[in-house]
Image: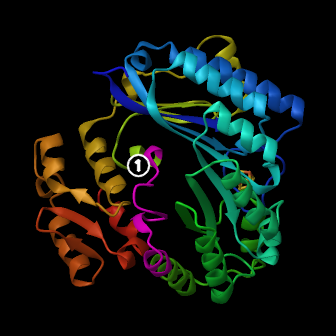
């Protein structure tokens, strides 16, 4: 194990899917197999180029997250190439958490075995719902049976750290269907459950239907009730609700995602991916051709003095990322990090906080942590805006 180096995360963005889901606003495109394999070649090149940077060489990577898009479209040998390149180009910690996102319809038994032997040790399966009508309305390519099978096969292949993603406030979904999805999710026995409310993203078929009043959406109050029902159900079943949309069995919080919320540094590779290293933020081009051209010319997005984060921004980010978690803002840590109290940095915040406390939306602990309650999580966007 290498010591005296800062630990960072590494995110790899796989920019393709088999087909686009109707609600999806992520940067992913339907691609044929040859296009996909070209993209992987470029990802491998970028991984090497970025791994060579001195500000990466002096760090240890202890979390890797392969997201997308649909990483499970990679064959076993493509995943192996990806992992081999990472191992060759980065200082990986012995106990690195290596997560791969997967969709039920593209996971096969052989792939699962190959992924496992390549070094993937955490799977995040996009199940979204256990109701076929709801899945159809989302434009997903799998049905509920395939979701269940994918989870069970992953277990059989030896994955002992599995997240499943589920969604609420969906068209064709009422409270009883949501409760059924929650029950089925819990009864599969995953270590981690992410639960997201539907967001209507521009430039999606859902957005068009929403504008034309043709989406059969759940209203905001019902969506709030669905969220609180999930919080309750997950707690009863032994999950720690450690972030707005994430719950884990003790010891299974996603270490990579925690880096985003505690302002740890992370490198990122792939079109549209953005990294945060040594106080600098960088962003790769989201247009695939521009991204490829930069790699071809050896000019990948780099740390640039104009993108050095200023103290005011860093204080804001510290507050609103901390507020996403059940640990909340550690006011002592804030003072240690920035050299002044949070109430001096944000002079209006004291009154606002007490207002939220009086309405049961915020708790302040005796050791100086400001945390949103579960009802508070529902209003988190409003409160986070106070720090911008
Ligand atoms: S599989 Fe995921 S990334 Fe791909 S289109 Fe569907 S929601 Fe978007």
Residue at image location 55% in from the left, 62% down from the top: 194
Looking at the image, residue 66 sits to the left or right of residue 225; the answer is right
Residue under label 1: 258
Q: Horizontal and vertical percent for residue 371?
A: 27, 67
Residue 204 in the figure: left or right of residue 158: right
| Picture quadrant of residue 250 | bottom left
Residue 242 placement, left or right of 130 = left
Q: Is residue 14 visible?
A: no
Q: Residue at x 66, y 39 (%)?
A: 116
SS at mark 1 in the image: helix
Q: Quadrant of the N terminus?
A: top left
Q: Is residue 242 magenta?
A: yes
Q: Nearer the viewer, residue 38 or 123?
A: 123
Residue 9: x and y in percent read 45, 35
The residue under the point 77% across, 62% down is 149
Q: Give the x, y percent position of residue 333.
A: 17, 48
Please provide the residue range marked out in magenta: 232-256
Which residue is at the front of the view, 171 or 104?
104
Q: Is residue 172 visible?
A: yes
């Amino acid at each position: 194990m290498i010591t005296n180096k800062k630990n960072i995360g590494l995110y790899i963005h796989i920019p393709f899917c088999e087909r686009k889901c109707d609600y999806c606003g992520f940067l992913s495109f339907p691609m044929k197999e040859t296009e996909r394999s070209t993209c992987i070649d470029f990802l491998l090149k970028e991984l090497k180029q970025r791994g060579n940077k001195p500000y990466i060489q002096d760090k240890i990577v202890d979390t890797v997250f392969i997201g997308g898009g649909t990483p499970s479209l990679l064959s076993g040998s493509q995943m192996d190439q990806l992992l081999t390149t990472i191992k060759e180009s980065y200082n990986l910690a012995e106990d690195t958490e290596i997560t791969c996102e997967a969709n039920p319809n593209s996971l096969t038994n052989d792939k699962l075995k190959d992924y496992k032997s390549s070094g993937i040790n955490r799977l995040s399966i996009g199940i979204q719902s256990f109701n076929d009508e709801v899945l159809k309305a989302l434009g997903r390519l799998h049905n509920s049976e395939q979701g269940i099978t994918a989870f069970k096969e992953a277990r059989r292949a030896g994955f002992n750290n599995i997240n499943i993603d589920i969604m609420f406030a969906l068209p064709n979904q009422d409270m009883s269907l949501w409760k059924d999805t929650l029950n089925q999710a819990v009864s599969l026995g995953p270590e981690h459950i992410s639960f997201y409310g539907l967001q209507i993203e521009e430039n999606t078929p859902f957005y068009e239907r929403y504008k034309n009043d043709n989406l059969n959406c759940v209203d905001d109050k019902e969506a709030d009730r669905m969220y609180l029902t999930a919080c309750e159900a997950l707690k009863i079943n032994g999950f720690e609700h450690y972030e707005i949309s994430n719950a884990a069995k003790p010891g299974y919080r996603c270490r990579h995602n925690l880096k985003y919320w505690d302002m740890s540094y992370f490198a990122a590779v792939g079109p549209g991916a953005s990294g945060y290293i040594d106080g600098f933020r960088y962003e790769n081009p989201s247009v695939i051709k521009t991204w490829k051209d930069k790699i071809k010319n050896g000019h990948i997005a780099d740390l640039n003095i104009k993108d050095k984060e200023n103290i005011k921004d860093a204080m804001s980010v510290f507050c609103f990322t901390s507020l996403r978690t059940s640990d909340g803002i550690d006011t002592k840590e804030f003072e240690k990090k920035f050299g002044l109290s949070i109430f001096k940095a944000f002079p209006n915040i004291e009154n606002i906080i007490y207002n939220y406390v009086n309405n049961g939306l915020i708790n302040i602990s005796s050791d100086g942590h400001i945390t949103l309650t579960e009802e508070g999580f529902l209003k988190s966007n409003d409160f986070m805006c106070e720090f911008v």
